[in-house]
């Protein structure tokens, strides 16, 4: 009976976090949308975690589709909100704490202190598509030097939006919407090309994605991490072989190899023959 109850703790914990955010934003912003938005996302994540505990094979993929499609189609295409990094800079410069700024604060800046790069594994609409490609486990060695590209993309997005404000360009909301459409299209095309070139579905995440500039440093201090029980571990390296981000989860230190790249996909946990993770 105790074991069954424990299975509810983690899904309930995540649901309560998002529900707290939902209620606080609803009351402080006096906008019912935030109650619906974060309640929906929290419920989707809780459902996925519960299904994972029930050993359902596609638990994470269900969450990816529920959250990713909601943000891409409903928030992006229907509500015309730019949820990409350009949208974050836009709302930041206008001094408006809503939409993209709230999304980034919760999911990509402060949230990772709790759940690391869980965003990348469970909610990203770019990775949602890329994870359908055939190279779920990297077939080629990681190209560490290429990861510097993400910083150039990050800087370019900031400079682009700053220039729009500096030169007093009109109709900025419409421009932001087109940036969302074009930006997503480019991300998908580049991500698919890189996946086949490097034989790695997550090549885009490792080398191009500018959001990781926020995610990586915060994930270093993440409360939720995959840890290894050294007494059970037999050093079979199966966890390393199935990890899409090439994280050494057998090392429990925060300085472990690619430690800030972990997306909490739990492939290592599912494939550990000794249940050491």
Image (cartoon, helix red, strand yellow):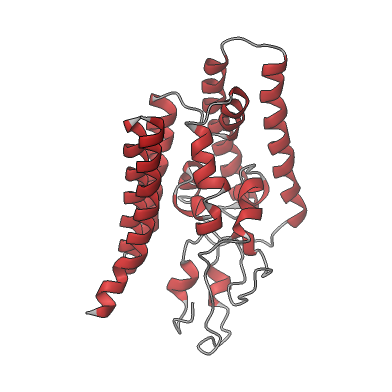
The image quarter containing residue 75 is top left
Q: Nearer the viewer, residue 186 or 33?
A: 33
- Residue 51 drawn above or below residue 6: above
The image quarter containing residue 54 is bottom left
Relative side of 146 to 221, left or right: right
Asked if residue 225 can be seen in this view, the reply is: yes
Relative side of 24 to 115, left or right: left
Q: Report x, y in % for residue 231.
A: 53, 90
Q: Report x, y in % for residue 185.
A: 54, 31
The N terminus lies in which quarter of the figure? bottom left
Q: Residue at x 59, y 49 (%)?
A: 195
Q: Report x, y in % for residue 57.
A: 35, 63
Relative side of 254 to 181, left or right: right
- Residue 78 drawn above or below residue 229: above
- Residue 39 drawn above or below residue 244: above
Q: Report x, y in % for residue 182.
A: 56, 26
Query: How many numbered dots are placed on residues in this image?
Result: 0
Q: Residue at x 69, y 59 (%)?
A: 142
Asked if residue 116 can be seen in this view, the reply is: no
Q: Residue furthest front?
A: 28
Q: Residue furthest left?
A: 1
Q: Residue at x 31, y 38 (%)?
A: 36
């Amino acid at each position: 009976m105790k074991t069954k109850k424990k299975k509810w703790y983690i899904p309930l914990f995540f649901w309560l976090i998002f529900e707290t955010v939902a209620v606080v934003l609803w009351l402080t912003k006096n906008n019912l949308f935030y109650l619906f938005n974060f309640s929906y996302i929290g419920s989707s994540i809780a459902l996925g975690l519960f299904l994972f505990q029930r050993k359902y094979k596609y638990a994470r993929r269900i969450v990816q589709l529920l959250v990713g499609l909601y943000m891409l189609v409903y928030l992006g295409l229907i509500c015309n909100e730019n949820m990409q990094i350009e949208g974050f800079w836009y709302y930041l410069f206008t001094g408006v704490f809503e939409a993209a700024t709230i999304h980034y604060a919760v999911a990509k800046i402060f949230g990772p202190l709790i759940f690391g790069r869980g965003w990348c594994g469970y909610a990203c609409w770019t990775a949602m598509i890329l994870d359908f490609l055939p190279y779920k486990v990297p077939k080629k060695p990681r190209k560490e030097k290429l990861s510097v590209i993400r910083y150039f993309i990050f800087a370019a997005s900031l400079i682009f939006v700053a220039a729009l404000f500096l030169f007093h360009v009109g109709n900025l909301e419409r421009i932001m919407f087109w940036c969302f459409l074009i930006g997503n299209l480019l991300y998908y095309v580049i991500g698919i090309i890189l996946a086949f070139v490097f034989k790695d579905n997550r090549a885009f995440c490792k080398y191009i994605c500018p959001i990781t500039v926020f995610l990586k440093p915060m994930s270093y201090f993440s409360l939720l991490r995959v840890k290894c029980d050294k007494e059970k571990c037999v050093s079979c390296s199966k966890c390393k072989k199935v990890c899409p981000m090439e994280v050494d989860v057998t090392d429990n230190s925060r300085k472990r190899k690619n430690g800030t790249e972990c997306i909490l996909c739990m492939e290592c946990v599912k494939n550990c023959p000794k249940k050491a993770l």
